[in-house]
Image (spheres, rainbow, N blue to C red):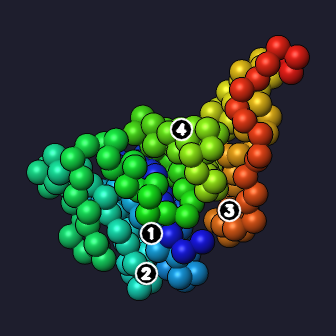
Amino acid sequence: MKIITVFCGSSFGTDEIYKEQAALLGQTLAKQNIELVYGGANVGLMGAVADGCLNEGGKVIGVLPDFLRSKEIAHTGLTELILVESMHERKTKMNDLCDGVIALPGGFGTLDELFEMITWAQLGLHKKPIAILNINGFYDSLLELMQTMTDKGLLKEVNQKMLLVSDDIEDLLDKMKNYIPPTVGKWIDKKQN
């Protein structure tokens, strides 16, 4: 993996560890010569992951919708800032640029980005590893919901397992590097229930 896209909050959240781990992820990517692609902002966890990577001499590409630049949140110290027209174009561009995706804590936008990428993988539109850095159990409830979806016959177990999860950065990156995508489709027939 040479380039990883990171989705995360434009706020810091209530736990200092979110900011610390975002910065550490950026630093770790730089140390492993993995470029960072992210949403292009200088605020919240987005700014922390970018600054962590840049401070270690890493390359950082931001992808920012033009309407957000006018709100003065664009990071000015990036290796490259790509301006796009819409949020959908942003996700498409971030997917096009990367070899894998990591989600950190975030809100609706982070979940939207994460689920679009995992849905595209489930549909076979790409074979990239999609991962969650589950800092302090932030995503435990979401993972429990995904288990319920599987238990109730709405999500195949093989597709559930496509989402890689760890609370440790090095372990998560190892899982991503060793990821083998499933070869089955997403649809469940009555015999499988």
Question: How far is the residue under mark 1 from the one under mark 2?
Answer: 8 Å
Residue, far left: 70
Determine the CA span between mark 2 and mark 3: 19 Å
State which tag comes first along the sequence, 2 or 3. 2
Would you name the residue on which mark 3 appears?
176
Label 1 amino acid?
Leu
Task: Please report contact status of discs 4 and 3: CB closer than 8 Å, yes or no.
Answer: no
Rendered position, 92 above or below 147:
below
Q: Which residue is mark 4?
A: 115
Q: Is the residue under label 3 in contact with that under label 2 (CB below 8 Å)? A: no
> Which tag, 4 or 1, sits closer to the chain's start?
1
- Does the rendering let one see residue 176? yes
> SS at mark 4?
helix
Question: Do residues under tags 1 and 2 come within 8 Å of each other at their CB atoms?
Answer: yes
- Report whether residue 19 is seen: no
Mark 4 is on which residue type? Phe
Image x and y of residue 83, in percent: 22, 58
Residue type, label 2:
Gly
Reply above or below: 136 against 77.
Answer: above
According to the image, label 1 marks what residue?
A: 36
